[in-house]
Amino acid sequence: MDSEPRPALAGPDESAAAETEAVEPPEPPSTILPRLFPATVKERERGASFPQSERSRTFRRRFFPSATAIHWNDWRWQVQHRIRDLAELARIIRLSAEERAAVARHSGPLPIGITPYYASLLSETDPAQPLRRTHIPIEGEYLTSPGESGDPLGEDHHSPVPGLVHRYPDRVLFLATGFCSTYCRYCTRSRMMGGGEMSFSLRQWERAIAYIEAHGEIRDVLLSGGDPLTIATEKLEWLLARLRAIRHVEFLRIGTKVPVVLPQRITRDLTRMLRRYHPLWMSIHFTHPDELTLEVAESTARLADAGIPLGSQTVLLKGINDSVPVMRSLMHGLLKLRVRPYYLYQCDPIRGSAHFRTSVAKGLEIIEGLRGHTTGYAVPHFVIDAPGGGGKIPLLPDYVLGREEDTVVLRNYEGRIYRYPDM
């Protein structure tokens, strides 16, 4: 950690939502031509304005004509102008009859919420476009299939205090907020997101911190929610500072989709703050190659340049990313952004998720299509987060075929058989 002073330990507001915060001073305009991979850290620092793709500029001028480039690059403006209702969604996207009915029917948690930036990536005309399918409801969301539940991972049963999940011996999941800038329709915690069954407050944070302080076996804290990066920078630093002050906590992690759906949030102020709390790791939720834009290249570069190891978490989704070519393209693109493919999740059986879930065999097929056909760095762990709280269980294709006396019989990626002496 560097020697910069930490903030006074004044608590967060009750909602931890970003909308009420004062807007940061606009950064001076860049004189650097936009490129997918700017050459150096120093060059990015000189180019103070966040890059905008031509697609973003066209979308902004068409649907938000009063917004300047400075507005668009301000993450709080993005949060304040999220698409949140049927009228606003229909202004931007030609909804199918099914989408329109599903949006109109919605009530309760997991509302519609899409940042203008991410909305610019959605197809205006094609309901089958992968990114559009993951963020606009359809009628299947209201059908409950056998085996589905509101809390499929049994997190509530492993929660010693509200907002903290202690499932594994040496680590805890710290749910810091119920707010996301953009809501995925297959969200595992849909029951508590965007005004669901759990409130988030300073008192809750303090109870969770006290529990961690009292349990010396906890060495790893994962901040999630909701999305921790939607918390205002000074409040997030307050939380990180409190956790870092616990002697037996060895490292911190943040689980987020913000660098993908709200890349403008990755300001230099944020990255300067985060680097004070190393070792700090980040798991980023990516879904499809269409998310790998100029803006996302910048957000991940800023994080990587701050020394934060980046890993990806991808949910396997039917008709969205459940093919070897799509998954290979995504994993290769992530490596170019210095993001290590980490987990490929079998979709959790949350209520109303049957239209998203593939067979387990499909996930194994994808892993087999990656292993040996590309670098091992591009092959994530395929896991099922066991229903009821059993934790992550890794799955692999059958490469071990059996034994013959003192040898193990193996199958390689080409289907060839090999024998390894195993005395």
Image: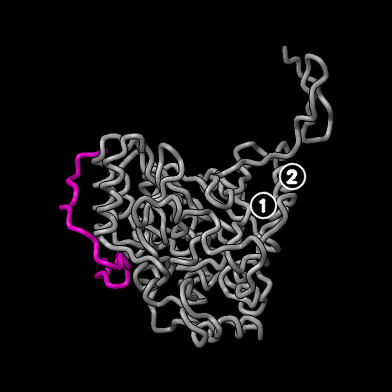
Question: Circle 2 sits on which residue?
Answer: 369
Give the residue at mark 1. Answer: 327
Where is residue 58? Give x, y as percent: 52, 76
Q: Amino acid at mark 1?
A: Met
Vertical arrangement, residue 318 with respect to residue 67, above or below:
above
Closest to the observer, 348 or 411: 348
Answer whether residue 69 is magenta in the image: no
Quadrant position of residue 259: bottom left
Q: Is residue 177 above or below residue 246?
A: below
Relative image position of residue 197 (x, y in whole percent): 41, 68
Q: Residue at x 78, y 31 (%)?
A: 412
| Residue depicted at x 34% and y 35% | 250
Q: Which stretch is magenta? A: 1-27
**Quarter-wise, where is residue 216 in the image?**
top left
The residue closer to the viewer here, 311 or 252, is 252
Quadrant of image for the C terminus? top right
The number of numbered discs placed on residues in the rendered structure image is 2
